[in-house]
Amino acid sequence: MKAMLLTLSVTLFFNIAQAESIPAAGEKLAQQCASCHGPDGNSTSPTYPKLAGQHEDYLAQALHDYKSGARENPVMAGMAGPLSEQDIEDLAAYFSQQQGLSQPELD
């Protein structure tokens, strides 16, 4: 019984530790996003949304939605499909911590 409790405790510890988002890991993963969204999430093209400075929960939900097909975009579905839950959390943490740059309309 003690061995089973110890095994369960260790398993829970590592699952909880893994669930924490790691922005540094997200930065490495974000290299795949850079060609469209820019290296820091500030896309220079109006075609691609800026990710920098967006809320972490919003970014994670968007990636989950692309992965599940709830949001339809073939390119993003292909990018989000292979991401693990940890990858999604890490990417969301990284982009949410970047400084968003606005491009105001000038008259």
Image: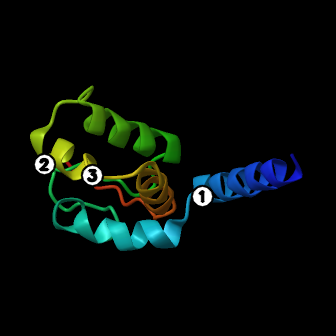
Picture coordinates of residue 47 (x, y %)? 13, 48
Q: Which mark is residue 47?
A: 2
Picture coordinates of residue 87 (x, y %)? 42, 57
Circle 2 Cα neighbour tier, 10 Å, few/some/many (<14 / 14–19 / ≥20) = few
Q: Nearer the viewer, residue 4 or 16?
A: 4
Picture coordinates of residue 35 (x, y %)? 16, 67
Q: Name the N-terminal-most of marks 3 and 2.
A: 2
Q: Which mark is residue 55?
A: none
Q: Which residue is mark 1?
A: 18
Query: Number of marks in the image?
Result: 3
- The reply to whether residue 38 is visible in this rendering is no
Q: Nearer the viewer, residue 81 or 50?
A: 81
Which residue occupies 47% across, 59% down? 90
Nearest to viewer (mark 2 / mark 1): 1
Q: Name the N-terminal-most of marks 1 and 3.
A: 1
Tag 2's secondary structure?
loop
Tag 1's secondary structure?
helix
Picture coordinates of residue 31 (x, y %)? 28, 71
Give, as a three-letter code, the residue at label 1: Gln
Q: Nearer the viewer, residue 44 or 16?
A: 16
Circle 3 Cα neighbour tier, 10 Å, few/some/many (<14 / 14–19 / ≥20) = few
Q: Is residue 40 above or below residue 107?
A: below
Q: Residue furthest top?
A: 70
Give, as a three-letter code, the residue at label 3: Pro
**Mark 1 vs mark 3, CA separation in Å:** 18 Å
Q: Is residue 22 above or below residue 102?
A: below
